[in-house]
Every structure is written in C-alpha cells, then in structure tokens.
Image (cartoon, rainbow, N blue to C red):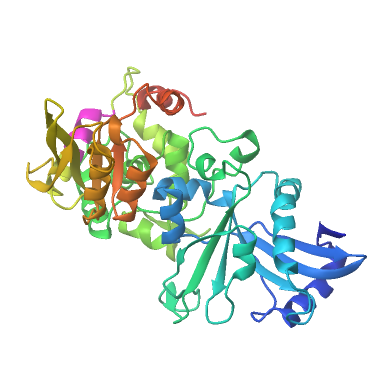
C-alpha cells in the first residue's frame, strides 16, 4: 500500500539529493508557500513531489478560469503549482505508478496544505516540456490540457523581466474539488479559502504608463485642503486612489494595499517623494508610498469649523477632464443585442456605444427558433469572430452565460452582463456583492 506524507526537516537532505538525481531539472527551490510530499511503499520512498506558488500570469490559465487582473491578483494563492514530480526508480520500471501517485496527491494535498499554511487551495497547475515528456501520466490522472506557454523564463538577473527560452511547455490543470472552477471566481469563497484570497502577487496598473503620468499631472491641480506640512502631494494620493478603485479595490484599506505593492519606479512616475535616511538625505532609487493615514486624512479633511473641505466636485471635474482627453485610448464599450420583427426574424448587432458605428451584423431566427440559429449562439459566434482587444462588451440577460463570457475573454476583451431572477443563485450573489457601503460611509471609520 502506498501512503503520502509531508517531507520533514530531517528528510530534506535525502529529498534534495534524490530530486536532483531523478529529475532532469535538478533540485527545486519553491517560492512562497511550499509543500514537499514523499510517497512510501512498505517504508521505501517511491516518489517525490514538490508543490509551490502558482505562476503570476498565464494567458491560457487565466482565460480558462475567466477572471480579470484584479481578481487574479487577490486569489492567485488558491492555485498551487506542481514544480517537481519524480519516481524514485529507473525509467519504465514501475508502469502506471506516476498516475497513481498523482491521484493520491490530489486527494491528500488539500488537507496537508491546510495543516501547514492555514487555507485550502482550489486548483493545481503544472508544466510539461513537450520536447522531453508527453504528459501521459497527467492525462491519465484526469488533468486538463489548458494550452501552451509562449516559451519565456522569468529572470531577475537581466534587464528584461522575462527572457525567451525557445522551449514552450504544455500547461495542465486539475481542480482539487468538484466545484473548484466555479468557486475560484465566485463572490463568496468557502471559509477555508478566504484567508488566502488577499494575495500580493503583483501590482497590476489599470492604465498604461503615459495615461498614468497624464492622470497624475491632471489630479495635481485639484485643490489641496491640507496644510503646508504635508509629506506627499495631492496628485500622487488621488492618482493612487483612482487607480486602486479602477483595479477593483472596494474600500480604503484595499486602495492602500494596492499602492503598497507598487514598485519604486512606479511611485517615481506618480510624483511620490524620495525616501530620506536617518540624516534627512534622500535615498537614491527609493520613493515613499503614502500611508493609510495620508489617504484617510486627505479624503476626510475638515476645516476649523469641523466641515469636510475636500472638494469632491473639483476632484470629479479634473477626473472627467482627463477621461475626456483619453477618448479612443481607454477600453472601448461595445454593446451586443438582437432585434426581431414579431420574434420571427431579426439581426444580432455589435455596436460601438461611443460612436454609434455598427461593427458586426449577423442574421438570427426567433429567440426560441432552430438550434444554433437563435440569438444566443449567434451572439457567441459573432463575438468569437471579432478582435475585442481593450473592449468592454455589454449584453442583456439572455447572454449572461459562461460561454459568452469566456468568448469575450478569449478575444481579448472584458464583459458586463445583465443578471435577472431567472438565474436566482447568480442574482443572489450579485445582490450580496452590491451590499457595499458608499465610499463616503467607508471613510467615516479607519477600520
């Protein structure tokens, strides 16, 4: 009988030696939360498996899940990566053992991970070098082939963060529970997963570099009600606040968390001051991120009479002016809908909301007509034929389906879909999500 357990401290030396001997990539160095598993049969080691943090961004994976950048940033820890897997035996000596060990690992890993790190992951991912292995054991164990990587390696030793390696790999994924694909993008995570849904994976800016710079310049012109002793100007604070909200932050703490994850060069572009050493001299290459109190103090500032004197209207006016200047640069808004004459015949149209231009038209039968010719499949087929890069596609409740959303994401866009009571569970989740205090109320208390 084969059993699995976590590698103990006294096993690490032997584990590393065997991993280096039996795996073509050598000894692993897991990043973030890591678990090393040892498979034993009659007291003998028959397999090793190293699990660690998921990759930051994988287009095939992110499209399969259907989440956006903000959700990926928050929930990345709910995916674990199988970094190393090796059989402690000569190649071909134990047929079918690999898929057997994979099945055992998937059953036992959630409990082992929770015991060590305090939360339960939902999905597993791994890569197979198609020039070396066929990935047969993963397919036999029920893993799904999601797509291929572009063949880049993450590097900290070069000017380019990713460098080409000319060796694309196949990405496989496996849910760790039956409803994992739905749960990882749901509004209400299970309690055992919630503590991991605040990952600091990376700071994803919602705007391009030029747009961020122009936004900072525009918001510098908002009237600052604070005194002269302020350490960070109003422009950087309001720019960070605006970008944090655009990236999905729902309260001031989340905005501050977003700001803290930015790198020094990003803070520099926003006009943040340089950090000073103990003698008051600026430190080269280091910049100050505004504190939570700096955000709170500005947005809730009161005059001597106790009245709020941060001019929200002035902030909104400058923000609107900037957005107007970005016409054609921010994501497009495309609306898709079907129009029918007495529900007998009609057209599905995709329209640019801003210009009114019709970008695509497809014929459709009545809404409950012939299979494959009614409005919903025609909408999906039409969107699948379009380049939706940097576009936000809106549609009515008829198109509020997983396939529609997935199609938009695969074509490079994002979506806003109407939800009605004919999908009661989804409608209830949306109502729960919308029960969020207004920004003004959220700022009344620090915590």
Q: Can residue 203 be spotted in the picture? A: no
Q: In the image, 330: left or right of 405?
A: left
Q: Quadrant of residue 273?
A: bottom left
> Does 185 sit above or below residue 444?
below
> Does 156 sit above or below residue 106?
below
Front position in the image: 325 or 410: 410
Q: Residue at x 46, y 26 (%)?
A: 425
Q: Quadrant of residue 412?
A: bottom left
Which segment is the magenta one? Answer: 310-319
Total numbered circles: 0
Q: In the image, 438: left or right of 355?
A: right
| Residue 408 pos. (x, y %) | 30, 49
> Does 396 sit above or below residue 212?
above
Q: In the image, 209: left or right of 251?
A: left
| Residue 63 pos. (x, y %) | 41, 54
Front position in the image: 401 or 327: 401
Q: Residue at x 45, y 69 (%)?
A: 149
């Amino acid at each position: 009988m084969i059993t699995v357990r976590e590698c103990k401290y006294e096993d690490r030396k032997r584990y590393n030696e065997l991993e280096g001997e039996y795996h073509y990539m050598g000894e692993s160095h897991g990043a973030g939360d890591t678990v090393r598993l040892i498979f034993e049969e009659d007291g003998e080691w028959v397999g090793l498996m190293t699990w660690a943090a998921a990759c930051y961004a994988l287009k095939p994976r992110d499209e399969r899940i259907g989440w956006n950048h903000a959700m990926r940033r928050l929930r990345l820890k709910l995916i674990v990566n199988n970094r190393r897997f090796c059989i402690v035996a000569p190649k071909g000596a134990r047929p079918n053992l690999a898929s057997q060990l994979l099945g055992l690992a998937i059953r036992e890993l959630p409990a082992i991970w929770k015991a060590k790190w305090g939360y339960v992951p939902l999905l597993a991912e791994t890569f197979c070098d198609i020039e070396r292995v066929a990935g047969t054991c993963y397919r036999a164990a029920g893993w799904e082939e999601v797509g291929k990587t572009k063949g880049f390696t993450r590097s900290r030793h070069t000017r380019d963060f990713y460098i080409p390696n000319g060796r694309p790999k196949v990405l496989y994924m496996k849910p760790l529970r039956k409803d994992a694909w739905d749960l990882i993008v749901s509004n209400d995570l299970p309690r055992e997963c919630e503590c991991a849904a605040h990952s600091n994976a990376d700071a994803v800016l919602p705007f391009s570099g030029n747009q961020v710079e122009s936004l900072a310049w525009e918001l510098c012109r908002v009237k600052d009600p604070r005194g002269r002793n302020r350490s960070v100007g109003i422009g950087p604070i309001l720019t960070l606040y605006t970008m944090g909200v655009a990236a999905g932050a729902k309260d001031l703490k989340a905005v501050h968390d977003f700001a803290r994850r930015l790198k020094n060069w990003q803070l520099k572009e926003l006009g943040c001051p340089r950090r000073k050493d103990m003698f008051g001299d600026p430190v080269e290459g280091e910049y100050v991120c505004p504190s939570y109190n700096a955000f709170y103090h500005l947005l809730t500032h009161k005059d001597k009479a106790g009245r709020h004197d941060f001019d929200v209207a002035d902030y909104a006016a400058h923000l609107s002016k900037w957005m107007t200047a970005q016409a054609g640069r921010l994501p497009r808004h495309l609306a898709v809908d079907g129009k029918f004459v007495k529900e007998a015949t009609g057209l599905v149209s995709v329209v640019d909301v801003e210009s009114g231009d019709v970008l695509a038209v497809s014929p459709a039968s009545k809404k409950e007509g012939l299979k494959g010719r009614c409005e919903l499949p025609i909408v999906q087929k039409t969107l699948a034929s379009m380049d939706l890069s940097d576009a936000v596609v809106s549609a009515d409740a008829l198109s509020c389906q997983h396939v529609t959303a997935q199609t938009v994401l695969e074509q490079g866009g994002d979506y806003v879909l109407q939800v009605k009571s004919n999908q009661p569970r989804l409608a209830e989740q949306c109502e729960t999500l919308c029960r969020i205090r207004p920004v003004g109320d959220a700022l009344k208390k620090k915590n």
